[in-house]
Amino acid sequence: MSIPGPDGRDLDRIRLLGLRAFGHHGVLAHERAQGQTFVADVVLHLDTRAAAATDDLADTVSYATVAEDVVAVLGGEPVDLLETLAERIAAVVLAHGVRAVDVTVHKPGAPLSVPFDDVELVIRRHADRDEDRGARAAGIPADDATGDARPTGDGDPTDDGGPIGEAGPTDDATGDAGRADDRVGAEVPGSDRRPAGPLTTRPAAEVPFVLALGANLGDAVATLRATVAALTAAEDVEVSAVSPLARTAAVLAPGQPDQPDYLNAVVVGTTTLAPLELFDLARRLEDAHGRAREERWGARTLDVDVITYADLRSDDPELTLPHPRAHERAFVLLPWSQVEPDAVLPEHGGVAELADRAADRSTVRWLALDWLEGPGEQGAR
Ligand SMILES: Nc1ncnc2c1ncn2[C@@H]1O[C@H](COP(=O)(O)OP(=O)(O)OP(=O)(O)O)[C@@H](O)[C@H]1O
Ligand SMILES: Nc1nc2c(c(=O)[nH]1)N=C(CO)CN2
């Protein structure tokens, strides 16, 4: 069934049917141990008119890449429920920039005691900002969302109380006008639901960003690889470099129980997404890999932090820029300095020098330079 687009006309659909992979999902021990074939049908709802006019793949979604991402979830980290599997598939597909997706997950080998042909779960998910925010509100404890639970002295953004996108030291008295070239782009559709401002404004031209990835639960290498692949495939995002993979001791709050080592990497690139759109993409990728948000600095399947977006400064607790703790984290600074040796973190200084001074510097060990391909190390510990 078609869905109306923003102009009221029906969206088009790309249907990928019978995508399959051998997976280990299920509640029962033998399902986890032996595995079985899982099948997915995905229907992408999008407007294909621009691509039809230009005949250019860049104006639509590459169904081949979507298919690879879906199969990676089917054959990836085991989950108990078809519901979880379908939700993860929806999240990786939405990360490609389609407006909505229908996901049908089939489990023809389900452990039933009666004859049957198939078990199917069908879900529809929208890339609608209200719904994104609803899901986020449901998944994140209030403390976490406001930053209130952060220890004192680590840059709690709520202490600063400044306005969104407060002008930084590089800006003159004209504030945002000082960055006019970067900030005059279109408002994000639906941004009326968030206060209009620099965080919801798309740049007129591509701007640089830095993302930090971390994982210390599950098959961390596979998760990080899939995340880089999804970022590379994402609409309006150009990945220009990915750092070597580092193995790092978990940096914990005082008294926090020990955790497995992390695998960390940094992705740099350019984007025409608004800052909060880039942040939402990061959140969707975390959700796609089953990120739980129960404990601050808890062990996690995937963390994607926005470290910098152009030269934007923001004191908004939802998206503080630059990331308020990046300057003291060797697990961010060292990988970043590997791909951008001369990078500077506004207000703090050269990234390579900051890395050398960071308290966790000695715990960072390089695992692999070419970790995006090949067998890699399985898991963080
Ligand atoms: N630059 C940023 N990147 C990612 N999250 C941010 C940023 N600025 C503020 N936040 C907010 O921080 C909150 C906690 O995010 P997250 O769960 O990723 O934290 P964490 O990884 O446990 O800790 P840390 O923020 O110290 O890395 C979220 O509500 C998010 O909106
Ligand atoms: N080594 C390491 N430690 C952490 C990390 C991380 O990515 N790597 N992330 C945290 C919260 O974002 C807390 N501690």
Image (cartoon, grey):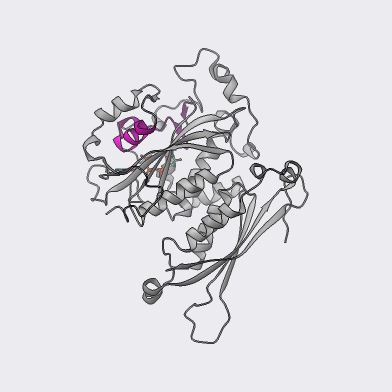
Q: Position of residue 168 (x, y in %)?
A: 46, 20
Q: Is residue 324 left or right of residue 6?
A: left
Magenta span? 312-339
Say which residue appears at 52% left-offset and 12% top-offset.
173
**Residue 162 can be seen in this image:** yes
Residue placed farthest to the right in the image?
9
State ligand 1's quadrant: top left
Q: Position of residue 226 (x, y in %)?
A: 45, 51
**Residue at 31 percent of width and 53 percent of height:** 377
Viewer-proximal residue, 51 or 188?
A: 51
Q: Position of residue 308 (x, y in %)?
A: 45, 31
Give the residue displayed 30% in from the left and 52% down from the top.
Answer: 380
Specify the quadrant that holds the C terminus: bottom left
State yes or no: residue 182 in magenta. Answer: no
- In front: 354, or 297? 354
Residue that sits furthest to the bottom in the current view = 114
Q: Is residue 313 within the magenta segment?
A: yes
Q: Position of residue 196 (x, y in %)?
A: 60, 31
What residue appears at the point 64 percent right and 53 percent down from the top-left corner? 100
Query: In this rendering, does residue 286 appear at all?
Result: no
